[in-house]
């Protein structure tokens, strides 16, 4: 896959839809992430909220800022869950930028395709529109035909996500909230070849600096001396007292095998060059050529990409190259530190060979370097050059209770406390319809009334207040469906399957659900029509309609169909009609289980799952 824009990495392959995504970055903004979710799921926010499925799992740097005082609350971006950060070294920055995604043939089906994207960009429109960025993408179809090198990288990225999550974030273990993430990580691990001949191209700095890993792979890939070293970075290290060549530039000269007179080029923004700028002001750059980055589209975007390219330059073309790109700036913190060091950064990247022969235009497109790139004159360097030191900000406080779940028999709300909350800790919780009350850490659950179905709960203690998600007894997250007023509306909603993708919806359909018109409805408030005769007619119409629709469905839609039936029967049908069916003993679910109403192509396992779902619904409707 080739990404033309940052949002393209979320675009499903032809015929597939998004299943799950693990997203790691330093920062992310709501508008961009919402558009990414729209691309990934092909569903508008209302549709995603109706499904109650968590598709994307977000891990951002935990530092507070003027624009970020808490993680994204539940339902702010439907279908996305952001993990709460742990209190790690406040000088250590999560600067990694990676996306691991799974796609499937249907919305409720298992993954059939994986994608790994290593980025230099954050999940923001600043990165997407105002900065020069790079991304590396590899797709792995789960059909046994993917190359071993690609599978190794996907497996390595999955392990990184797991280790990052375990070490820097709180993860409540309830299955409903992280079920798809669990599947994504399991499938990513399963694709790793039993034997591998080389190390992954994917690298990270959880425990070791990027530099050593880059150098090892460059030296392994480059057999003959190269005569070009081209690099760029959004930031460089902090200036020192003395204007000397930055340590990282000296390190880069040792990455691979180079000729005695190899050309060294570094791209910098003159107001963001850190130690490089202080050193270059003196004019003695020890053989390094320092240029401004060049935006071939003339949008005046600033360089934010971090990359190092070593290749052979001849007659204006480069070839036989090796490339690092990733999140790590060309600074001590970026490529010479690691996550377990005091003040060390967590970074990600990829190192791979570039066999293409690149001419001048290709160099501009890929590395923002052109023969028209301008040298930076002495007066253009900013005074007091900034480096890549993070702002002095605290880590966000996490709530004492991470999430909750509705449990049955007896009906209660289970509370999932943080694993490091001390015994005897108190918190105050509330939700819509229930005033705040105190709970203690030893209290695992609280009773729920029959009519209470909180989609989220408010949690507070002496440090602050938060909103955390609730998983209902069906495993849906933050689910608050809207019922229909009439049987006709409910039947229309049930037969509106499969769910239409966002691009097929009208503008007025993308907002809230439009309530049915009860004025002319058969089953409105006109009690005279709620007779046994009508109840029988409605039941027959429902059974016939479901049987006709499911007989025409393809096998990949089976899981989606079961989920759709479950949601519709739990939420859509008018309570008055259900009471009439209860009164007259009309168990529509018993009839739907009959063999002649099920497609003959269904397997025994599919029939079993269908029957089990109908039995559960009959209990919910109190028909058995």
Image (cartoon, rainbow, N blue to C red):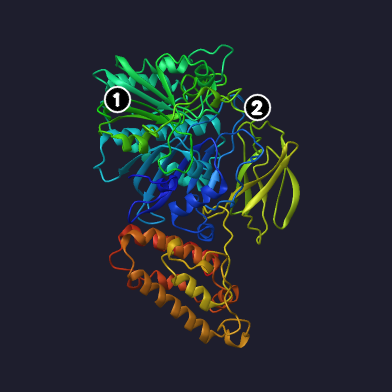
Residue 375 appears in the figure:
yes
Q: Nearer the viewer, mark 2 or mark 1?
A: 1
SS category of the residue bearing label 2: loop
Question: For the N terminus, which image quadrant?
Answer: top left
Q: Quadrant of residue 183?
A: top left
SS category of the residue bearing label 1: strand
The image position of residue 475, as x and y in percent, is 52, 52
In the rendered view, tell whether residue 135 sits above or below residue 503: above
Q: Residues within 10 Å of mark 2 (few under 14, many from 20)?
A: few
For the residue pair 130 and 492, the one nearer the viewer reads as 130
| Residues at marks 2 and 1, CA–CA distance in whole angstroms | 39 Å
Contact between marks 2 and 1 (CB within 8 A): the answer is no
Q: Which residue is mark 1?
A: 311
43 with respect to 413 (left or right): left
User: Residue at position x 38%, y 46% from top?
Assistant: 4
The image position of residue 67, as x and y in percent, is 64, 41
Q: How many marks?
A: 2
Q: Which residue is mark 2?
A: 392
The image position of residue 574, as x and y in percent, is 57, 73
User: Residue at position x 58%, y 79% from top?
Assistant: 517
User: Residue at position x 60%, y 76% from top?
Assistant: 576
User: Residue at position x 44%, y 18% from top?
Assistant: 249
For the residue pair 28 and 147, the one nearer the viewer reads as 28
In the rendered view, tell whether residue 501 sits above or below residue 442: below
The image position of residue 240, as x and y in percent, is 57, 14
Q: Quadrant of residue 518?
A: bottom right
325 with respect to 171 (left or right): left
Residue 501 appears in the figure:
no
For the residue pair 387 and 471, the one nearer the viewer reads as 387
């Amino acid at each position: 896959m080739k990404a033309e824009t940052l949002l393209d990495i979320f675009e499903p392959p032809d015929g597939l839809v998004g299943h799950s995504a693990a997203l790691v970055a330093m920062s992310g903004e709501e508008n961009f992430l919402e558009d990414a979710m729209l691309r990934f799921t092909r569903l508008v926010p209302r549709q995603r909220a109706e499904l109650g499925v968590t598709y994307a799992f977000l891990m951002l740097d935990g530092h507070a800022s003027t624009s970020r005082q808490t993680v994204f609350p539940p339902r702010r971006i439907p279908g996305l869950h952001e993990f709460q950060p742990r209190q790690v070294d406040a000088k250590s920055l999560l600067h990694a930028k990676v996306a691991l995604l799974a796609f499937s043939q249907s919305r409720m089906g298992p993954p059939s395709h994986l994608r790994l994207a290593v980025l230099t960009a954050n999940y923001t429109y600043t990165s997407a529109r105002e900065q020069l960025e790079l991304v590396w993408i590899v797709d792995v179809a789960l059909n046994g035909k993917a190359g071993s090198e690609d599978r190794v990288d996907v497996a390595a990225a999955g392990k990184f996500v797991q280790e990052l999550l375990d070490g820097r974030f709180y993860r409540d273990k309830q299955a409903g909230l992280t079920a798809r993430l669990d599947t994504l990580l399991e499938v990513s691990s399963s694709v790793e070849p039993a034997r591998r001949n080389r190390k992954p191209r994917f690298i990270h700095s959880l425990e070791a600096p990027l530099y050593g890993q880059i150098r090892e792979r460059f030296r392994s890939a480059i057999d003959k001396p190269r005569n070009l070293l081209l690099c760029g970075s959004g930031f460089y290290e902090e200036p020192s007292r003395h204007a000397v060549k930055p340590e990282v530039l000296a390190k880069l000269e040792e990455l691979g095998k180079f000729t005695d007179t190899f050309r060294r080029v570094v791209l910098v923004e003159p107001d963001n060059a850190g130690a490089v700028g202080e050193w270059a002001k003196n004019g003695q750059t020890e053989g390094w050529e320092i240029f401004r980055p060049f935006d071939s589209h003339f949008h005046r975007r600033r360089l934010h990409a971090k990359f190092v390219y070593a290749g052979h330059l001849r007659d204006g073309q480069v070839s036989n190259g090796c490339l690092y790109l990733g999140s790590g700036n060309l600074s001590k913190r970026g490529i010479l530190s690691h996550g377990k060091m005091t003040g060390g950064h967590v970074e990600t990247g990829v190192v791979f060979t570039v066999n293409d022969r690149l001419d001048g235009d290709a160099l501009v497109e890929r590395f923002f370097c052109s023969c028209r790139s301008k040298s930076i004159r002495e007066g253009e360097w900013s005074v007091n050059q900034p480096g890549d030191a993070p702002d002095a900000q605290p880590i966000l406080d996490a709530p004492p209770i991470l999430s909750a779940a509705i449990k049955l028999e007896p009906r209660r709300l289970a509370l999932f406390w943080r694993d490091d909350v001390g015994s005897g800790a108190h918190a105050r919780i509330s939700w819509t319809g229930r005033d705040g009350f105190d709970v203690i850490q030893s209290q695992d659950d609280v009773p729920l009334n029959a009519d209470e179905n909180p989609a989220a709960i408010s949690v507070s203690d002496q440090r602050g207040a938060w909103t955390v998600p609730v998983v209902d007894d069906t495993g849906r997250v933050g689910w608050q469906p809207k019922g229909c007023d009439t049987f006709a509306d409910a039947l229309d909603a049930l037969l509106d399957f499969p769910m239409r993708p966002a691009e097929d919806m009208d503008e007025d359909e993308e907002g809230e659900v439009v309530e049915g018109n009860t004025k002319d409805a058969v089953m409105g408030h006109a009690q005279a029509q709620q007779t046994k005769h009508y109840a029988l007619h409605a039941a027959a119409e429902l059974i016939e309609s479901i049987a006709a629709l499911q007989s025409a469905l393809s096998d990949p839609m089976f899981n989606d169909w079961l989920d759709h039936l479950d949601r519709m029967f739990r939420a859509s049908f008018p309570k008055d009609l259900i009471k009439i069916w209860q009164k007259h003993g009309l168990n529509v679910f018993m009839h739907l289980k009959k063999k002649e109403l099920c497609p003959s192509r269904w397997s025994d396992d599919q029939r079993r799952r269908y029957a089990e779902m109908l039995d559960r619904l009959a209990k919910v409707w109190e028909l058995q």
